[in-house]
Image (cartoon, rainbow, N blue to C red):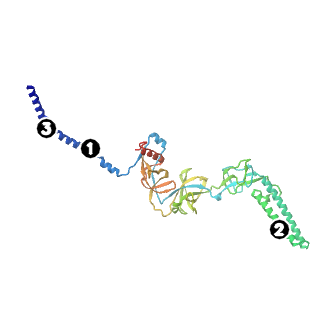
Amino acid sequence: MRILAIITSLALIVACSGGAGEPAHEEGEHDEKGHDEKGHADEGHGEPGHQEEAEGEEHEESVTLSPEALTVAALRVEPASSRSSSGSFATSARITLDPRREAQISAATAGQVDRILVRAGETVREGQTLATVVSAELGEAVAAYHTTGARREAASARADRLRGLESQGVSSRSAVAEADAELQVAAAEFEAAEERLRVLGVRPEANSGGHYPSQFPVRAPIAGEVLAAEARVGQSVEPGAPLFHVGNLDEVWLVLDVYERDLGKVATGQEVRFAVDAWPQEVFTGTVDWVGAMVQPSSRTVELRVVVPNPGHRLKPGMFARADLGLAPHGNGETRVVVPAQAVQEFEGRSVVFVQSAPDTFAARTVRIAERHGSDVHLAEGVAAGEPVVMEGAFTLKSELAKSELGEGHAH
């Protein structure tokens, strides 16, 4: 009984110290702690409100490259530049020669190259002999010249004799007419043989002694520089086979290809500024002096011609150029960011450029294209002037971004 009384007393002591009051304290503590945890949760997980706000904004993907991938990609990043749409019109162009100032020179007839008298790079005058060609046809032409000459002389003598006899009443008028007709035929054959010699470079009047060379000369029809010399000693040639290319480089043409849709933006008299790869820092200038009269069916472009003085002959035929034309007066004067066409990539149905946000990170920025001019793209919105844009290598970043979208990598 004593033990039972001790146990009962201990139970009453425990009940008084925490039995009835303890639950109330725990509940209050729980409410306060719950309030604190909820407040903490609102503080830490109160992001849902911000998240909903962020979801209202456009999501901008990005690509992060490892140092090795960055080296391999060889990206070129430059600040985006702006340009007035009425200030210039960019297009591709090429350097050519005025057709009146260049000549493809070939042999007039079949033969074999005997001598070469000039080399590429030399300046020649009009009529200068560039090479000589030995030809069997030259001998035949000389023989025809002598034969037709003799026939003409005989026909002339016969006609004179018959006219004399007619005056004496010995010859008939019909015989004289027949002799005159034979003389005309002989004279025509002689003139043709004489002209044939001239085509072969032989001047009959300079060979009154009857001696003709066994070679005919290949002469320059214009003055200029020997741009190419294809002839080789001993080479067999056919009529029309190119032996020399001569051109006058004192003046060249800049030929521009303008798309049909842009034709209304150009006119004669517009200023043209252009550069070539050989001197990228130097700007050459000229004005449009002719707008093509037809649209090329395959490319839907029209040619523009600019005559450009060429002191020092630095501009070479066949060079490519990047040209800017001062636009016609109807330009709207709006300034836009201009990037190379290769900087703009199509991704998931939208046009994007990659803007560098960190040394190894590039954000895919959605842009709206205003217009395209040759190799340049004018942007209406999406990129501000001065932002670092990937000008070369954007396709590599697009590929990496596509991989991340497929779960093959992490682009963010």
Residue 342 at x, y percent in the picture = 49, 50
Q: Earlier in the sequence, mark 1 or mark 2?
A: 1
Q: Nearer the viewer, mark 1 or mark 2?
A: 1
Q: Earlier in the sequence, mark 1 or mark 3?
A: 3
Q: Is residue 361 visible?
A: no
What amino acid is labelled 1 in the image?
A: Ala
Q: Viewer-proximal residue, 184 or 39?
A: 39
Assign a secondary structure to mark 3. helix
Real-space Cα separation, disc 2 to disc 3, in angstroms: 152 Å
Q: Viewer-proximal residue, 167 or 18?
A: 18
Task: Classify residue 311 by image quadrant.
Answer: bottom right
* Label 1: few (<14), some (14–19) or many (≥20) C-alpha neighbours in 10 Å: few
Q: Nearer the viewer, mark 1 or mark 3?
A: 3
Q: Which residue lies under the disc numbered 2?
A: 181
Which residue: 77% across, 60% down?
A: 195
Q: Which residue lies under the disc numbered 3?
A: 21
Q: Which residue lies under the disc numbered 1?
A: 41
* Label 2: few (<14), some (14–19) or many (≥20) C-alpha neighbours in 10 Å: some
Real-space Cα separation, disc 1 to disc 3, in angstroms: 30 Å
Which residue: 50% across, 58% down?
A: 89
Residue 65 at x, y percent in the picture = 44, 42
What amino acid is labelled 2 in the image?
A: Ala
Q: Viewer-proximal residue, 49 or 244?
A: 49
The C terminus - image quarter: top left
